[in-house]
Amino acid sequence: MTTTHILNALPDIPRLYTAISEWLGCLVYLLAIGSRTSRLRMAAVLLPGLAVLVVVQYWAGTLPIAFWIISMCLAVACMYAIIMLASGLGALDGAYLLARAFVLAELVASLHWQLDSFMRPAGHGLYDPASLILLVLIYGGVGLLAWVAERRNFADTQPSVPGRSVFMAAVIAVVTFAMSNLSFVSTNTPFSGRVGLEIFYIRTLVDLCGFAMLYAQQEQLRESHTSAELASINARAYSQHREYMRSKENLEAMGRLAHDLKHQIAALRSQMDPERKSQDFEELEAAVGRYGAQQHTGNPILDVVMSTKERICSEEGITLTMVADGSLLEGMAPMDVSTLFGNALDNAIEALRKVKEPDRRLIKVALYARGQFVVIRIENYFTSPLNWKGNGELATTKTRTDGGLHGYGVKSIRHIAHRYQGEITLRTEHHWFSLCVLLPREGDQLKPMAASATL
């Protein structure tokens, strides 16, 4: 036979405190996702949201104990509405944040009430100055610690959590809530306590374990996302390098062919009537010259990449101009050279395919030294709107039809810049897009960081 008799039972957590803890849980995770939501929108939802949670909690306090679960579900629904309205996330991402916010709210409320009940002298009211100071310290301190711990997990990427992970987070939240409140339902179980402070200790400990499990889950998801992103960058780099090797072979073959054809054309010209054949031969010679021309920057890898992209630009009706001292890339790995310039020029060419005016289909490339830095600047005209993400990254406008390699061009360039202790900046002005890479030199060459020698 079950019993709900608890020795030295502590009073229930005040409804006002429960509402504040639930509101605080929502606030912590809305702040954790950072710039992906407007501060004004967040404030416009959170302020009335607190009032709604307080009303719901006090209304639930008037209901019979049999409706306790229903009242908790209503409070959780209010938390979900606050998160969705303030963040604009998708349904699954909002549910994932809700599970975490709910467990944090349970932990904060339980920890504060356990300490308050233990430390508050007999006869002192809930709203004595000392009790209010403890309330602010516990709620504010735990909320701040949770935000500091969680912002790294949500700062770089959208949650975009798989459905299975959302389900697991929900299960953890439900089990945590059930186990932490089991003693209030029945003290006659192997996992129940029978003394007031003991019950709150169990509740606080279970809530802390639930929070830790959810934190570990998000950490694992973040690491999995980072690993997948690095794998895609790595695949993109090898794809660019393979393109470079094929282009090198093709350019060498075309160079030999163009050289032979020029001699043959010269021989034919001397035998033909110049007045009748001159124009045809000039056009043929110009075409041969275009395919036989190669860039000479002082870096053989850059020569191949630029020559290949120049030929593509010529076929696309794009004007590519370049002023580059390839010798400044001394110390940069061949794969990094081909990946950096290949990705940057591919992005520029893709943008210019959408530009209709021939005189605006322009790409400018500059590679020069400024003090102890190497500056790489690639600019192109654009007309289509750019897709900026909340963290300042430039998202792709392409569809993922090639195995997921699209969208990682800029990230790959940034990864290479960081490898050589550099940084990149993206800027737009008057329909001109500018990618600038700044790399420090040690002596007369670039040096990669030892910890980042490979992708």
Image (cartoon, helix red, strand yellow):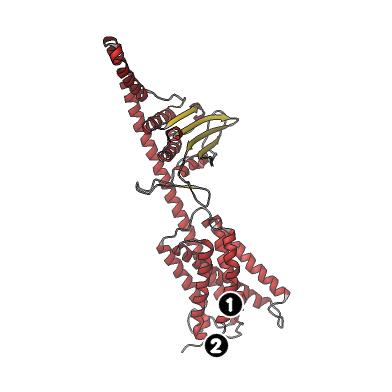
For disc 1, the neighbor class at 10 Å (few under 14, some 14 to 19, many from 20) is some
Depicted 53 relative to depicted 285: above or below: below
Taking the spot 44% from the left edge, 24% from the top edge, the residue there is: 296
Q: Quadrant of the C terminus?
A: top left
Q: Which residue is mark 2?
A: 5
Q: Secondary structure at mark 1?
A: helix
- Quarter holding residue 25: bottom right
Q: Which residue is mark 1?
A: 55
Depicted 433 relative to depicted 288: above or below: below
- Quarter holding residue 268: top left
Question: Residue 379, how many percent across, how many down?
Answer: 49, 36
Disc 1 and disc 2 in contact, CB within 8 angstroms: no
Horizontal placement of 230 versus 441: left or right?
Answer: left
Horizontal placement of 142 versus 96: left or right?
Answer: right
Taking the spot 50% from the left edge, 74% from the top edge, the residue there is: 177
Q: Amino acid at mark 1?
A: Val
Q: Amino acid at mark 2?
A: His
Question: How many marks on residues?
Answer: 2
Depicted 276 relative to depicted 293: above or below: above
